[in-house]
């Protein structure tokens, strides 16, 4: 098993995306990239801790490659909006890849470079950070599997459900039965 850590806006949106992929053992929402030890959600939301809301993904590289995970990440969030995703604004919502190995760093840098050349983002600057993995602090328990436990909440219906529909349409062969 290997570990990957990604930030792409609210972790409520990113966690279910990775949780439903074949080869992913678990995806845990949390905080990384900041300067305060063991921050709370409220502290991170203040924007003063430097942390990003992120997801730590444990995956089997024999079933899904790190490059495949990067492809899903970049398909499911906007890497051109600095410190925001949709209505979620602040440094905690930045786009970032926190690499754990030199190989992950090289793959992430290639993916960002390739993404910057794609016609889809023509004229837009890709702002995704590629930075070393830092201490990862799991989020409070009520954030875990938030979408699965709260599908009828407004944010879930308006923001996460459309992302999940996009995931099912674009990556159906890569999903587990739970992800479908």
Image: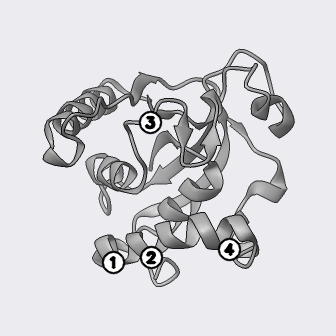
Real-space Cα separation, disc 2 to disc 3, in angstroms? 22 Å
Question: From what the image shows, is residue 131 above or below residue 4?
Answer: above
Real-space Cα separation, disc 2 to disc 4, in angstroms? 14 Å
Label 3 element class? loop
User: What residue would you read off at disc 2?
Assistant: 165
Residue at left offset 73%, top offset 79%: 152
> Mark 3 and mark 2 in contact (Cβ < 8 Å)?
no
Residue at left offset 49%, top offset 41%: 6
Question: From what the image shows, is residue 128 above or below residue 15?
Answer: above
Q: At which x and y percent is residue 88?
A: 63, 44
Real-space Cα separation, disc 1 to disc 4, in angstroms? 19 Å
Closer to the observer: label 1 or label 4? Answer: 1
User: What residue would you read off at disc 4?
Assistant: 148
**Pick the front one: 138 or 83:** 83
Label 4 element class? helix
**Pick the front one: 131 or 124:** 124
Closer to the observer: label 2 or label 4? Answer: 2
Label 2 element class? helix
Label 1 element class? helix
> Mark 2 and mark 1 in contact (Cβ < 8 Å)?
yes
Image mark for residue 169? 1
Question: From what the image shows, is residue 51 above or below residue 122?
Answer: above
């Amino acid at each position: 098993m290997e570990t990957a850590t990604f930030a792409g806006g609210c972790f409520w949106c990113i966690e279910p995306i990775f949780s439903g992929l074949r080869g992913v053992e678990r995806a845990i929402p949390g905080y990384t990239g900041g300067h305060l030890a063991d921050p709370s959600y409220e502290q991170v939301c203040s924007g003063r801790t430097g942390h990003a809301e992120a997801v730590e993904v444990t995956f089997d590289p024999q079933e899904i490659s790190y490059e495949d995970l990067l492809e899903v990440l970049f398909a499911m969030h906007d890497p051109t909006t600095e410190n925001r995703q949709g209505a979620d604004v602040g440094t905690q919502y930045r786009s970032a890849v926190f690499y754990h190995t030199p190989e992950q760093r090289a793959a992430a840098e290639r993916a960002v470079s390739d993404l910057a050349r794609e016609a889809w983002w023509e004229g837009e600057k890709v702002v995704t950070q590629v930075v070393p993995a830092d201490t990862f602090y799991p989020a409070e328990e009520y954030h875990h599997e938030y979408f699965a436990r709260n599908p009828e909440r407004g944010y879930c219906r308006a923001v996460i459900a459309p992302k999940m529909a996009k995931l099912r349409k674009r990556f159906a062969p890569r999903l587990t039965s739970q992800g479908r």
